[in-house]
Image: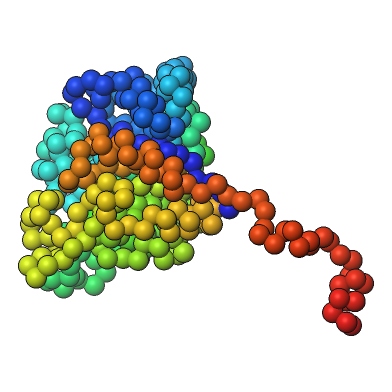
Amino acid sequence: MKTIKGPAVFLAQFMDEVAPFNTLDGLCKWASGLGYKGIQIPTLDKSIIDLDIAATSQTYCDEFKGKINAYGLEITELSTHIQGQLVAVHPAHDIMFDVFVPKELKGKPKQRTAWAVDQMQKAGVVSRRLGLNTHATFSGSLLWPVMHPWPQQPKGLVETGFKELAGRWLPILNTFDENGVDVCYEVHPVEDIHDGDTFERFLEATGNHKRVNILYDPSHFVLQQLDYIKYIDHYHQFIKAFHVKDAEFNPTGKKGMFGGYNDWKNRAGRYRSPGDGQVDFKNVFSKLTEYGCDVWAVLEWECVVKSPEQGAREGVDFINRHIIETTTKRFDDFAGGADTNKKELRRILGI
């Protein structure tokens, strides 16, 4: 067994134009002051980290890491959720996802994909330069618009989609492998990797690439009505990153899993601050600990009711209360259990 590390916080949802959330120093001081020990760092905003510079400069990376360590914090993982998403975008989503790319790439899907792949490969190099061995990202999606089979999917469509997705990711995965870093895909709606079956499809399509792993976030499984505890039983060997985010699913006679095109507040499935939703975190932490999952417990805040400031303040104590300090003793050690020779063992059995 292994004690989960933490508490840590994902900075993406807290970044803002006002202090202290508008600079890396401000965010580090804020997180450290609340009692966090680690931060997961988004990489799209160059004011936080510039992947282009970091990929070629160890000095830049050393200074970046030193600044964070000076606040008593560790880097848990770099995050390329947005860049990973842009590795594979169905044309139906082109316009909406163009909001995330540099102005000169808008309306140019092929160039956008090439830029995203380049960003991902740089993130693999930078992760190594920072001494990290895990990385958080999304898979992107070519198949989500045909998720519900109507009209019926042409035979071979899903296989073709995963083959193409794997083909785009293999050069990235190889770069991460060269740098000794695991790629942890957040299993998430609107991604081609959104549950267990789709993770297995992708893993197989990559030839069981050893760098394909999982960022486990039970909130997304609540919204899908998937057994998030048994998921750990199935995939614990792949779980190498962990988001602590809660959710609730309250279907009515008018709406269910698909949400009726409502905003987040009025959907049946909603994200909540940890402890305010339906996730059994006591069982989640216990399972991850028993299986020896070497992960940071990283708070991800996305709540439709509670403020991010309150969610972050409460998240420290919530995670601390759920982290299990693993035992080195058995409950019956007092009864003795010294090694015994074979002759003595046979005598105990009366043989």
Q: Nearer the viewer, residue 239 or 191?
A: 239
Identify which residue is drawn at 46% across, 24% down. Answer: 72
Q: Residue 53: which quarter of the image? A: top left
The answer to whether residue 104 is visible is yes
Report the colour scheme.
rainbow
> Is 194 in front, or is 101?
194
Residue 27 as seen in the image, left or right of residue 296: left
- The C terminus sits in image quarter: bottom right
Left or right: 124, with 22 as reference point: right
Percent x, y of residue 170: 40, 48
Please identify the quarter of the rendering in which residue 34 is found: top left
**184 left or right, relative to 94:** right
Q: Residue furthest front?
A: 334
Q: Position of residue 8 (x, y in %)?
A: 40, 37
The x, y position of residue 145, in whole percent, is 16, 59
Is there any visible trace of residue 13 in the rendered image? Answer: no
In the picture shown, does residue 23 fall above or below 311? above
> Residue at the spot x=48%, y=34% of the render?
132
Q: Is residue 104 above or below residue 329?
A: above
Q: How many marks?
A: 0
Q: Nearer the viewer, residue 309 or 70?
A: 309
**Which residue occupies the extreme bottom position in the image?**
351
- Above-or-below relation of 261 to 98: below
Residue 17 is situated, as x and y percent measured from the top left of the image, at 18, 23
> With 78 as the anchor, is 304 left or right in this view?
left
The residue shown at (42%, 55%) is 282
Q: Residue at x 24, y 72 (%)?
A: 155
Residue 36: which quarter of the image?
Answer: top left
